[in-house]
Image: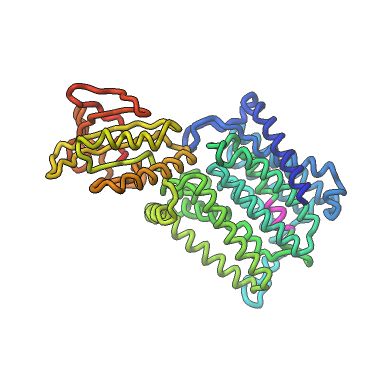
Amino acid sequence: MAVLFGVCLLISGVVIRLSVGLAARFGIMDCPGGHKQHAASTPFVGGFGLIAVLIGAALLGDPIFSEIPFLPLAAILVGSVTIFLTGLADDIWHLSFKPRLAIQALVALSMVFLGGVELDSLGELLPGLHINLGWLGIPLTIFATIGLINAVNMIDGVDGLSGSVSMVSLALIALVAYAGNAGGYVIFIVALMGGVGGFLYYNLRYPGNSRARVFLGDNGSMLLGFLFAWLLIALSQGSHAAMTPVTALWLFALPLMDTVGVMLRRIWLGKSPFRPDRHHLHHLFIRAGFRVCDVVLVATVMQIVLGLVGVVGLLLDVPDYLMFGLFLAVFAVYFLLILRPWRLVPGLCRLNRSLGLPSVHIRGLFVGSLRKEQWPEILRLIAAELGTAYAYQFNVYQLGESTLDGRNVFCVVHVPAEGNDLLIGRIRRDAMRIRRRLARQQGLAVRLFVCRDVENELGDELMARDGSRSADRRGVRRTLIYSAEHGQKLVHGDDGNFELSVPPACR
């Protein structure tokens, strides 16, 4: 298993790396704009690694998939290639949802008639009542397959999220398949996990990789969704099923709840359920100040917890109707939370602070309540602590109103760190260290310098400006008396008045 995982990891990584060079030539690029958050054009080639793993594993034949009959294995391969090419066409030519849904339905039909994978039963959803689908099995199989295909697509919103959640779900499915003596599918899942791992090497944010170098794209997300549909249906149906249908809901809980919840919210607002917006769970976490890497971590932990609830319920033989009722209760709570994002986001902000995580809105350090003769010494201390590892700018202001003790000067250390998770984390650590150094000096106000997200604050007012002087939201006049970058003076006049250069939304 370890060798298989490593080989598939290598195949996926190499194929994706080779595909990057061809992406720009054939227009397989995700360009910035619209509701997209990334700032650079990025190749849509994540699915190339996955399809290469599937084809490579299939060519090995019996040594790998000896326990899966030839016809279902051929149906998996044909369906995977078809859905991959459909997603690739969508990445290049931006197909409308109608042809996509039609092809997804055809692939689902091939899964039923060629692969023999079909929803026959939903289990004991009510006490003493086993729900057998009969002739409804085929249409519900098509509906479920289309839903799972698009669920992975819709959760693919920030770097590393869809790949990490998919990796967790695949690991849990492999665990259930192993416990249910479905050895052939365990090997298949391990190979697929290697393909996802190769993609995450390029897509996940980590030291040395500050942003995604490739995206999964529709070619990859639709392919993953199809494979999830096949695995969850195949392993939950038949007399030798490895899991119950309700367990399958838990193993794919987070993408499923996010997709259904967002679509129900759009319908509730009178909009098309297929109209894109920025109200997915990961969007709300970002608006609340969570860094992308922290969003991925939180979402992965959520999927682990939800998946383990399903696995434990299966192993303890908890009745289906109890597990289904619990799942509906969890989904109801989730839906009520995302229904009013303007209430959820402040709560997520508090969660971010309580967990001690760096906020994506951090832009440096604020030091207030300084006397005018103090600030040169404070700047020298800050410069010595920060060094020159990254760019930053000093701005020193003097308030127009006088104070009894003369503490009417404040300093802002501004760092251009938007979108750089690793830099934001370093800024926070450096700021906390400086804060401890300055704590011995009585009377100073030292805190993180945060650029507020005005999208989440109603009635926000912009600062008024008057030449080199400005007024904050409370009407207090302030004057910029010093500005420097990396400790080198940029501007210095005899009157000490300079134009404000820090974004007005920052406090």
In the image as oriented, which residue stretches furthest toward the bottom? 128
Q: Does the magenta stretch include residue 215?
A: no
Per the picture, the main secondary structure of the magenta-coloured stretch is helix
Looking at the picture, does residue 404 appear above or below residue 333? above
Residue at image coords 21%, 38% = 409
In the foreground, 166 or 416: 416
User: x, y percentage for residue 448?
Assistant: 35, 44
> Where residue 301 sits: x, y (%)?
56, 56
Quarter of the picture containing the C terminus is top left
Give the magenta part as a residue range. Answer: 228-234
Q: Can residue 340 be seen in this view?
A: no
Q: Which colour scheme is used?
A: rainbow
Q: Which of the pair 101/497 is nearer the observer?
A: 497
Q: Position of residue 447 (x, y in %)?
A: 32, 46
From what the image shows, is residue 384 above or below residue 405? Answer: above
The residue that appears at 64% across and 24% down in the rendered structure is 25
The answer to whether residue 132 is above or below residue 84 is: below
Q: Is residue 425 left or right of residue 73?
A: left
What is the count of numbered marks? 0
Please indicate whether residue 323 sits to the left or right of residue 375 in the image. right
Question: Would you identify the image quadrant in which residue 16 lies?
Answer: top right
Give coordinates of residue 183: x percent, y percent. Answer: 80, 58
Of residues 196 and 380, the one nearer the viewer is 380
Residue at x 43%, y 37% (from the top left corner): 418
- Residue drawn where x is 56% and y is 65% of the image: 327
Q: Which of 397 and 20 is in front in this view?
A: 397
Quadrant in which residue 444 is drawn: top left
Q: Is residue 501 visible?
A: yes
